[in-house]
Image (spheres, rainbow, N blue to C red):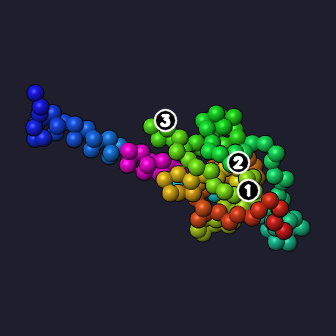
Amino acid sequence: MTRKSGSRFSEKIMLQEKRFAMRAGLTDLILIAMLGAGLGQGLAQGLPQSAAPGTGQSSGPSWPPLPATGFVSGRAATDKDVTEGNAVFALRAYGIPFGKPLNIVIPQYAYLIKKGQQKTPVIVVQAEEGKGIKIFGIRDLDGKTATARDSELQLLGTHPPD
């Protein structure tokens, strides 16, 4: 026996499909919100500031050498990479990885730029694109990790800035 398109069975299936689509959209929004919130509360707080003028101390950051390990380059990060400290995040939806690596040199120096705050020196340890958004895993000079969008970073390359 075939069911008509207006039957309760087909209405139930259509409702389930709509719920799934709504959940998928909500998951994308939650991922973006988590990345943004983690950054907003992360590196911009509690960082050592440059010394005050006239103190005899350097006014710029003392950049460390780039790490030889502890980063992900040329591929998307996995949960194992995050657990082992080699990545800051793993892009997944419903358990399925969806991040694609960006074609940039990793690791490299950068400044995190937040409106109304001083530039924060960081090292980029991961760069991926997911759902059309470029996301970077970064570490400040004390090793604290966060995520940033491309609009929040000034990439500086592999040589410490002057």
* Camera-side residue of 76 and 38: 76
Residue drawn where x is 66% and y is 43% of the image: 87
Whether tag 1 and tag 2 are in contact, CB under 8 A, the answer is yes
Region of the chain picked out in magenta, as a range? 24-35
Q: Is residue 132 left or right of residue 18?
A: right
Numbered mark located on residue 126 in the image: none
Residue 147 in view of the camera: no
Q: Earlier in the sequence, mark 3 or mark 1?
A: 3
Q: Quadrant of the N terminus?
A: top left
Give the image location of residue 14, x and y in percent. Answer: 22, 41
Could you tell me which residue is drawn at 53 percent across and 51 percent down?
A: 130
Q: Which quarter of the image is occupied by the C terminus?
A: bottom right
Mark 1 = which residue? 105
Residue type highlighted by circle 3: Gly
Q: Residue at x 11, y 33 (%)?
A: 3
Element at label 2: loop
